[in-house]
Amino acid sequence: MLIDLRSDTLTRPTPGMKDAMFAAPVGDDVFGEDPTVNALEEKIAKLFGMEAAIFCPSGTMTNQIAIRLHTQIQTEVICHKYSHIYLYEGGGIMANSLASVKLLDGNLGKITAVQVAESINPDDVHAPETTLVSLENTMNKGGGSIYTLAEVKPIRDLCQEKGIKLHLDGARLFNALVETGESPADWGEHFDTISICLSKGLGCPVGSALVGSKSDIKRARKVRKAFGGGMRQAGFLAAAGIYALDHQVERLKEDHTRARALGEILRKLPVVSEIFPVATNIVIARLDGITPEEFMKKLSDKNIKSVKFGKDLVRFVTHLDFGDEHLEEFEKRIKNGWL
Ligand SMILES: *Cc1c(COP(=O)(O)O)cnc(C)c1O
């Protein structure tokens, strides 16, 4: 049995999701005529208490569209130095929006209002104008760490006072919400735009959505077209999103329970010096006396897959296709004579 913990994007559609996909009424979404895409966009907008939403092929596209909406040439985005928008989107901030970035440091991938306040550029000919702050929840490189609304509120207030836009990369926002009990609408109130991924823990084969004001999402449709993201009978994919939101949100808690158990199993290994606090479905182990490559090779010899996440870090992500039987197997394989 392969135990694949490289990412929560590796899941395959469940039978119920496949049925929903094949049954979807579809039309040409570039003409705005796909009823299932329209239904998904309305559903997500309503869920977040925001005016409109747009369905896109990837979370990179929804983030990059948001950055395009909130910046111009010679302006600047403030974000954590480990942000997905900076590290993992192919240099898109520069390539798509010709904007500059200011990277902040902070515990478990999170930044504070005090840091943001210190980093906003003065109105000065030398400096790119700060127009956007972007947060990530949960924070991938922070080990799936969670921002609470109490932490976001002072950042929101500061941005409003300074006329700066606030975007959320909420690729795994639902992982945070099932833990905190906060609602999507609570979050919608605090941001100009929010990106969510349907293709991570929620288990869809493809898809992300950007939520925001009517005027922002109208402009987003034009940016999406220019990025090559206008899809035709995309309702087959949107149906998976509707199904996921109806059936596969609450179960994220199970992924978190298994991630905590996984962390405890790994913690006992002599070569593991630290496990980042396991807040959601991501487990990051710091290694001592072994390289990530050597460690991952030992695991892969036992048919367990993980990814390198830094010079001495390895990441494991739990998901829909990692059940209790996989967790038991994982423990057995690790215990049976390994290190
Ligand atoms: C996965 C992810 C994205 C989007 O990735 P795509 O693969 O382009 O869908 C954005 N932000 C974070 C934090 C992610 O983990």
Image (spheres, rainbow, N blue to C red):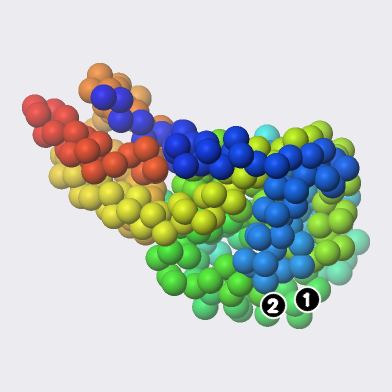
Q: Residue furthest top?
A: 301
Q: Secondary structure at mark 2?
A: helix
Q: Quadrant of the C terminus?
A: top left
In the rendered image, which quarter is residue 43 located in? Answer: bottom right
Residue drawn 61% across and 78% down? 154
**Residue 240 image point, x, y percent:** 58, 43
Q: Residue furthest left?
A: 337
Residue drawn 53% across and 71% down? 183
Q: Secondary structure at mark 1?
A: helix
Disc 2 residue crowd, few under 14, some 14–19, many 20+, Cα 10 Å:
some
**Residue 94 image point, x, y percent:** 78, 42
Q: Is residue 71 above or below residue 223?
A: below
**Residue 66 image point, x, y percent:** 75, 53
| Residue type at the position of mark 1 | Lys
Query: Assess mark 1: CB under 8 A from ligand 1?
Result: no
Residue 141 or 226: which is nearer the viewer? 226
Residue 226 or 284: which is nearer the viewer? 226
Query: Assess mark 2: CB under 8 A from ligand 1?
Result: no
Q: Quadrant of the N terminus?
A: top left
Residue drawn 39% across and 54% down? 251
The residue pinned by badge 2 equals 158
Q: Is residue 258 left or right of residue 67?
A: left
- All told, the count of numbered labels is 2
| Residue type at the position of mark 2 | Leu
Disc 1 residue crowd, few under 14, some 14–19, many 20+, Cα 10 Å:
few
Could you tell me if residue 203 is visible in this image? yes
Q: Is residue 246 left or right of residue 38?
A: left
Q: CA distance from mark 1 to mark 2?
A: 6 Å
Q: Are marks 1 and 2 in contact (CB under 8 Å)?
A: yes
Q: Which mark is residue 100?
A: none
Q: Which mark is residue 162?
A: 1
Residue drawn 48% across and 36% down? 13
